[in-house]
Image (tube, rainbow, N blue to C red):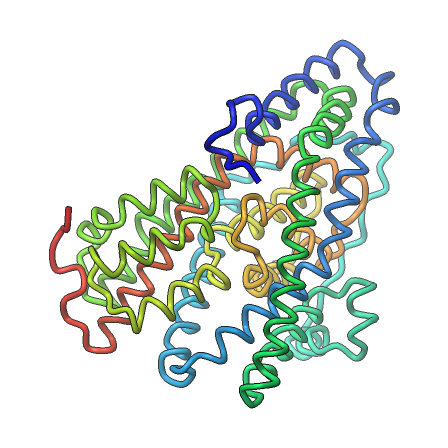
Amino acid sequence: MESSKNLPWYRRLHWQILMAMIAGIIAGLLGGQALVPKVGWLGTLFIQLLKMIIVPLVLTSIVSGVAAVGGGRDLGRLFGKTLGYYVLSSALAIFAGLLMVNLIRPGVGAKIVDLGKAELPELSAPTSPVELLLTIVPENVIAAASEPNMLALIFFCILLGMSIASLPERPRTLLVEVFEAAFQAMMKLTGWVIRFAPIGVFGLIVRMVGSTGLGSFRALGLYMLTIATSLSIHLFVTLPLLLLLLGRIRPAIHFRNMTEPLAMAFSTSSSGATLPVTLRTVEEKVGVSNRISSFVLPMGATVNMDGTALYECAGVLFIAQVLGEQLTMWQQLVVVVTALLASIGAAAVPSAGLVIIFLVLQAVGLEGPQVDAIVGAMLAIDRPLDMYRTAVNVFSDSSGAAIIARSEGEEGVDTEVVE
């Protein structure tokens, strides 16, 4: 496939989505409500295609990722440190998103969809820790996938990946290759669906503007501000504090050493595509040994998606605010847990969070055409946010590698800026 860098600007996906958004605004203003039934189905078709790939993508991504990582030679201490750091950093990112979306409240009073005739979704969530635990553990995995009970499905996938990792080498290698091949096939299918995004965005924007006018873009601007502010807090406050407190590393030095991978991550919106550059930089400039970097960074590109987890959590709360729903403490806890677990399955490709956000929405019962329309509007402005959260993901990975290297006795990590 031809690299996007070699394509003229008008053939690049993010520019096509922007042009589709502009065309949708113009068509919606000119055609009004009468145009909605004629082209709105394009947006519905795109959303259905996204939902179609959720279960197989999550199944293959989580199982292959956990199984491959778990079979490493440093499964014990190194695996525990790495997983512990990634869970901590993702949880802190989610709470930053929760804080800002509850402070700014970008969706309150927004008119992105017409709620006058809408049948609002009935929210669901456990009311106690015991009920939450029973929700996570599936009674029937096939039923959990078809309902879908995404918390239960993710839990099963993690357990299956861990069980594969504990098998003897021959069956483990065979199963890892099978799930990895299936994951690659799902990635190819996901890429095909994402290519349809400009047409889907056109239909969704026509429906939104034709039904509600331009007033919805104020809320979307506030939403962008909320996500960008949350990501900035995590990138410039939380992660530097982790570097200082856990690794005794000066954040300014680490930032300067990581300039090249951060620029690469921001331009490609893919932590997977940035991984070779991140590996080289972390070893040559940051000073982490190959023993640590070759284990921690590929694992991070698979399971550590701080920016994506933050986006999913804040995005779900934004949608609830637009619909006029007040999420209880337990419902927000379900959002946090699901976003944390679902980020493990967020493939390291552009706009992966767009697919995964449906998991979190379904966990609290936020479904229906109004929800789909809001997600479509969020997609239209997603590209710059996707670029930023990918840079956050990559910086979190490199910070984890540096912190773990220091904990393993490597004192030469980030002692100076390497040009």
Residue 415 versus residue 164 in the image, above or below: above
Lateral position of residue 198 relative to residue 32, left or right: left
- Foreground pick, 158 / 341: 158
Q: Position of residue 28 (x, y in %)?
A: 75, 17
Q: Position of residue 302 (x, y in %)?
A: 50, 62
Q: For the image shown, how many numbered marks are present on the structure?
A: 0
Furthest residue in direction front, as rendered = 1
Residue, x 35% and y 53% (percent of image)? 395
Q: Which of the 4 image quadrants contains residue 276? A: bottom left
Q: Position of residue 53 (x, y in %)?
A: 73, 53
Lateral position of residue 259 relative to residue 194, left or right: left
- Foreground pick, 411 / 232: 411
Lateral position of residue 205 relative to residue 298, left or right: right
Furthest residue in direction left, as rendered = 416
Furthest residue in direction top, as rendered = 30
Lateral position of residue 150 relative to residue 395, left or right: right
Residue 319 versus residue 31 in the image, above or below: below
Residue, x 39% and y 72% (percent of image)? 82
Residue 265 versus residue 254 in the image, above or below: above
Furthest residue in direction bottom, as rendered = 168
**Which image quadrant: the N terminus?**
top right
Residue, x 81% and y 72% (percent of image)? 142
Q: Position of residue 26 (x, y in %)?
A: 69, 13
